[in-house]
Image (spheres, rainbow, N blue to C red):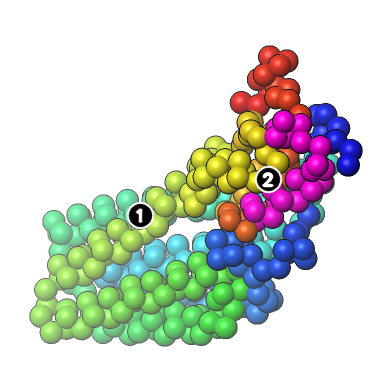
Amino acid sequence: MTAPPRNTYIDSMKDHHDHHGAPAHGHRHVHGDRRIGGGRLLPVILLNSAITAAEYVGGTLSGSLALISDAGHNLSDVLSLMLGYAGERVSEARPTARYSFGLKRFEVLIALVNSLSLLAIGIYILYESVMRFLSPRRIDTGVMLAVACIGLAGNLASMALIFRGRDSSLNMKAAFLHLLFDSLSSVGVVAAALLLMLTGQYWIDLAISVAIVVMIVASAADIIRQSLRIFLQGAPPEVDPEEVRRTLLSVRGVESVHGLHIWSISSSEAFLSAHVCLSGGDLRISGDELIRSINAVLLERFGISHTTVQIEETPLCSLSGSDCCR
């Protein structure tokens, strides 16, 4: 069997499912009929936009900051749903010579802008909470309860729309969870309205507002952290680079691994590049065979299906003094 040529780059951008069957549970790409879920995101976005507007108007008319806060929380869901919808559509765009990765980071850019906007909304609601604590306002609990019930009903209807497709993709899973937590938030506002009717204690409205703001800020902070990691080309949190290195070293025919890079190209895809030295210039294994073995284990163990692997008989970078492997 002929030894692989030196300094040969083999780009494995193919899908390996045909050769290796279904991936293990660690695979981060969730399969299913995307049309069931993605196709229903648009009506859910429109419905939640209407709920957001209704809660904001209802909160303004009734004087309930909890309703306005829930409108802000609903807005975070609308932005997340729009992000998911955009991700489903933009990810279908083919790469070009200039944009060789396609537009996969478009969704991350939107997520970063949206999460910064949510932080601004949270700061505004906290400011209003302080002002209303210093100068309490009378709240129309009838309007507050009616609008809160409408919001809860709308969230439940949205969950029903995408229930069947909730496992079709990571975007759909995230959308369903957002709607679930927003329904819980709406339950809190309904409970606050009932307690206000019974007790007349207006601080309850402020307490619910602050609790909702904490959820908004926590969600926004997590999105910002993930977005910055992707833009800074960090490895996905569920992938340990050292474990990847050890796994590659366990592949038959691999003596050493250097120039290992793992980075996220979007919220759901990771890429890997590495230089792999053959075991003592092992001539029994072809370059193609070694690449197939490496790609199979990377896909099964870590869900990484996009790789570029350079096969070497000797560590070329160290011999040439190049820093291309760092």
**Position of residue 186 measured from the top left corner of the image (x, y, whole percent):** 34, 76
The local crowd at label 1, few if under 14, some if 14 to 19, many if 20 or more residues have their Cα within 10 Å, is: many
Q: What kind of residue is marked 1?
A: Val
Find numbered disc 1 in the image and state the secondary structure of the residue it sits on.
helix
Marks 1/2 in contact by CB < 8 Å: the verdict is no
**What's the magenta region?**
277-299
Question: Quarter of the image holding residue 43?
Answer: bottom right
Image location (x, y in percent) of residue 173 = 52, 70
Which residue, given by chain and number where applicable, does mark 2 sit on?
252
Q: Report crowding for label 2: few under 14, some 14 to 19, many 20 or more residues within 10 A (C-alpha).
A: few
Q: Is residue 96 above or below residue 283?
A: below
Vertical arrangement, residue 304 with respect to residue 38, above or below: above
Q: Name the mark on residue 217.
A: 1
Residue 259 is left or right of residue 70, and the answer is: right
The earlier-in-sequence mark between 1 and 2 is 1
- From the top left corner, tell me how far across and down residue 106 is, in percent: 64, 50
- Residue furthest to the top in view is 321
Magenta stretch encompasses residue 64: no
The residue mark sitting in front, 1 or 2, is 2
Observer-nearest of 286 and 39: 286
Picture quadrant of residue 151: bottom left
What type is the residue that disc 2 sits on? Arg
Residue 289 among those drawn in magenta: yes
